[in-house]
């Protein structure tokens, strides 16, 4: 019974289905009312009687007028349906269900009212149009099950009750046929309505899946075109943005600029504090950069520690320069990560479309080139692209390729500079220095290729080459100690200690004769790493010297903690060295400090006897510089040492 009642119950809870039903039957309602008007007029013509004007003329004409009004209202609904709310549509559906039954009963009641007044032809005509109206109404309302089912029952029951007994039951056969037709229509209505509802729900499901697919596609696009760590656009999105600008051929001059930003010292943060700290630093930098970029700009992360900013607007180059300087200040601010204060710098290159060849993609390359130029000139600056930068970069790229080739072909050589005892003047040690004498394009000074090797990672094979060659050569120099410079990049390598021990095993060079030199700047940047490495080398019998002492800010605490065996006073401290000068007092203080910490002192860059005498008087242990010999090949060093030995022997004989 409940299932039967549910067939006639109106349910508008599914807003999607209700809207689809409304759109569907709203197209049929004008036709329904037109059929009703035509059938009413046909019956009116048959039953027209001036003696009964109200029942045969006024009533049908009033019913037709209302039906025409409703037909006109429904005619406008298909176009207005999109603007109707779900609640309004539900209201119209409920009203339609009521009016469908009321109009059907009114039409049927009017037909039964005038039926007795007609002749046999008129009565037959009336029953025909009455049955036709019922069938038309049900089929026009088929998508709205409740309205169709209610209308079918409302039409069929009164028709069956009235025409089964009127006129001695002569319409009984027609009544039975109409009941069967009505039952069939109700079955068809149920099946059609189920199929219609399923179709609507399938379309809704399909649309939902399509929206999910679009959302997933948008999410995939967001992932593909954004940096997962910072949320900024990535390199792909930046290039797509530049390509869109590239397609425009109406870009006025100096209305587009690109800044290329590279963080200085970020790799050291990653190495010393881990990638988690590096990620936190990147997020902080990204937030600061985005807060300072103007609204008409695009900030993107194009690499691990590289960023780019695209600026659009008048006088773009000047705007980019101002922004670049502001960003440098922001980047340099310290960041607190896990109770560690981390700090990096920045190098920025700027390029603007000030010439016809300055297309958007070309500007990115130029800005990168300008940034690279800053890197080679001390970092921490902003540089505007210049054509000459390309020549410098091409030269660096050429040297980079030549370094690898030179190692393979044996073009490099190790020279040695004597280190003498400050009191006796005897050669007690040598410093190994890398040279490139057999380069096909001509010899290249170390200052021009060491930085390139460190930037490209080629310093590792170069450093091992120097260490191995120097150990093999120094083995021929009886009793002399060997001093080898270690690049900060080598010192950061966790495998460096193992590599040094392997070289000593291969060359059979005594660890006690080997001294490694590390720069003061690296000590300050990587204190934890230095402590472990120094202890490891000292445990193996080697000594470790602090190079370039006086160029940084090493504290007494650092000197005491790290256990260096030697310090090398940088040659810059010897400038102005003279009796009674401030430079002399400074150097004397440094030597006294080192001696108090049980460290030997080596002074490099000694070029005059006056400097040597002042350093001896101050207590310096060893001296190195052009006064005692320039860097030279092993053969020249051996000859110089032999000459020094013979001279020392002659002096002893003369004294004796």
Image (cartoon, grey):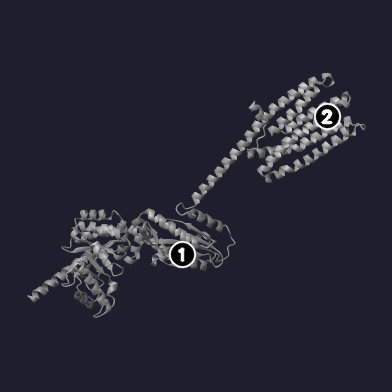
- Disc 1 secondary structure class: helix
**In percent of the image, x 23 and y 70: which residue is there?**
593
For this orientation, the residue located farthest to the left is: 656
Residue 634 position by quadrant: bottom left
**In percent of the image, x 71 and y 25: which residue is there?**
184
- Other-residue count near label 2 (Cα within 10 Å), few / some / many at <14 / 14–19 / ≥20: many
Place of residue 262 in the rendered image (x, y in percent of width and height, measured from the top left): 43, 61
Image quadrant where one finds the N terminus = top right
Q: Which residue is labeled 1 in the image?
A: 327
For this orientation, the residue located farthest to the bottom is: 580
Q: Which residue is labeled 2 in the image?
A: 111
Measure how far apart labels 2 and 1 are at the Cα level: 89 Å
Compared across the picture, whether 640 is left or right of 34 comes to: left
Compared across the picture, whether 68 is left or right of 651 comes to: right
Visible in this render: residue 433? Answer: no
Establish if 611 lies above or below 564: below
Front-most of 453 and 384?
Answer: 384
Place of residue 183 in the rendered image (x, y in percent of width and height, measured from the top left): 71, 25
- Disc 2 secondary structure class: helix
Compared across the picture, whether 473 is left or right of 131 comes to: left
């Amino acid at each position: 019974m409940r299932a039967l009642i549910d067939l006639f119950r109106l349910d508008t809870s599914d807003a999607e289905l209700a809207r689809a039903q409304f759109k569907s039957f709203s197209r049929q309602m004008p036709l329904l009312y037109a059929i009703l008007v035509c059938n009413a007029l046909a019956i009116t013509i048959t039953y027209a009687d001036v003696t009964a004007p109200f029942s045969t003329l006024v009533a049908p004409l009033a019913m037709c007028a209302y039906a025409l009004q409703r037909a006109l209202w429904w005619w406008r609904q298909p176009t207005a349906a999109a603007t109707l709310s779900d609640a309004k549509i539900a209201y119209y559906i409920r009203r339609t269900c009521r009016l469908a039954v009321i109009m059907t009963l009114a039409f049927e009641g009017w037909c039964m009212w005038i039926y007795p007044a007609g002749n046999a032809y008129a009565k037959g005509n009336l029953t025909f149009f009455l049955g036709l109206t019922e069938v038309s109404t049900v089929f026009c309302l088929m998508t709205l099950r409740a309205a169709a089912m209610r209308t079918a029952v409302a039409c069929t029951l009164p028709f069956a009750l009235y025409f089964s007994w009127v006129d001695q039951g002569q319409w009984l056969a027609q009544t039975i046929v109409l009941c069967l037709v009505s039952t069939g229509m109700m079955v068809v209505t149920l099946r059609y309505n189920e199929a219609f509802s399923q179709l609507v729900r399938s379309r809704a499901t399909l649309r939902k899946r399509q929206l999910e697919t679009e959302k997933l596609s948008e999410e995939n696009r967001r992932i593909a075109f954004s940096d997962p760590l910072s949320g900024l656009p990535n390199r792909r999105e930046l290039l797509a943005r530049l390509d869109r600008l590239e397609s425009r051929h109406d870009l006025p001059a100096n209305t587009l600029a690109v800044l290329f930003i590279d963080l200085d010292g970020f790799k050291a943060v990653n190495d010393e504090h881990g990638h988690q700290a590096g990620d936190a630093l990147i997020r902080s930098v990204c937030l600061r950069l985005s807060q300072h970029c103007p609204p008409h700009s695009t900030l993107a992360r194009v690499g691990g520690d590289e960023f780019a900013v695209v600026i659009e607007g008048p006088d773009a180059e000047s705007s980019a320069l101002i922004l670049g300087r502001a960003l440098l200040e922001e980047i340099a601010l310290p960041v607190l990560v896990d109770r560690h204060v981390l700090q990096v710098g920045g190098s920025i290159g700027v390029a603007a479309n000030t010439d016809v060849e300055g297309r958007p993609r070309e500007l990115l390359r130029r800005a990168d080139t300008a940034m690279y130029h800053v890197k080679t000139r001390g970092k921490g600056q902003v540089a505007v692209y210049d054509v000459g930068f390309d020549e410098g970069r091409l030269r660096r790229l050429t040297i980079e390729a030549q370094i690898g080739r030179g190692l393979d072909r044996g073009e490099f050589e190790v020279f040695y500079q004597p280190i003498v005892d400050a009191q006796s003047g005897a050669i007690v040690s040598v410093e190994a220095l890398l040279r490139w004498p057999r380069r096909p394009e001509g010899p290249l000074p170390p200052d021009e290729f060491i930085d390139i090797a460190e930037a490209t990672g080629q310093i590792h094979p170069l450093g091992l080459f120097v260490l191995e060659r120097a150990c093999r050569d120094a083995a021929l120099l009886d009793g002399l100690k060997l001093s080898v410079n270690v690049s900060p990049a080598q010192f950061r390598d966790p495998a460096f200690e193992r590599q040094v021990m392997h070289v000593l095993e291969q060359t059979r060079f005594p660890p006690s004769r080997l001294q490694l030199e590390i720069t003061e700047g690296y000590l300050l940047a990587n204190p934890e790493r230095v402590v472990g490495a120094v202890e490891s080398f000292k445990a193996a019998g080697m000594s470790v010297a602090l190079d370039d002492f006086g160029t940084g800010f090493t504290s007494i605490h650092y000197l005491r903690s790290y256990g260096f065996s030697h310090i090398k006073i940088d040659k810059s401290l010897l400038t102005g060295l003279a009796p009674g000068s401030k430079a002399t007092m400074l150097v004397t203080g440094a030597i006294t400090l080192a001696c108090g910490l049980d460290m030997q002192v080596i002074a490099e860059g000694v070029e005059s006897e006056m400097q040597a005498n002042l350093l001896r008087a101050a207590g310096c242990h060893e001296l190195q510089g052009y006064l005692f010999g320039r860097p030279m090949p092993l053969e020249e060093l051996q000859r110089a040492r032999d000459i020094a030995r013979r001279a020392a022997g002659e002096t002893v004989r003369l004294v004796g």
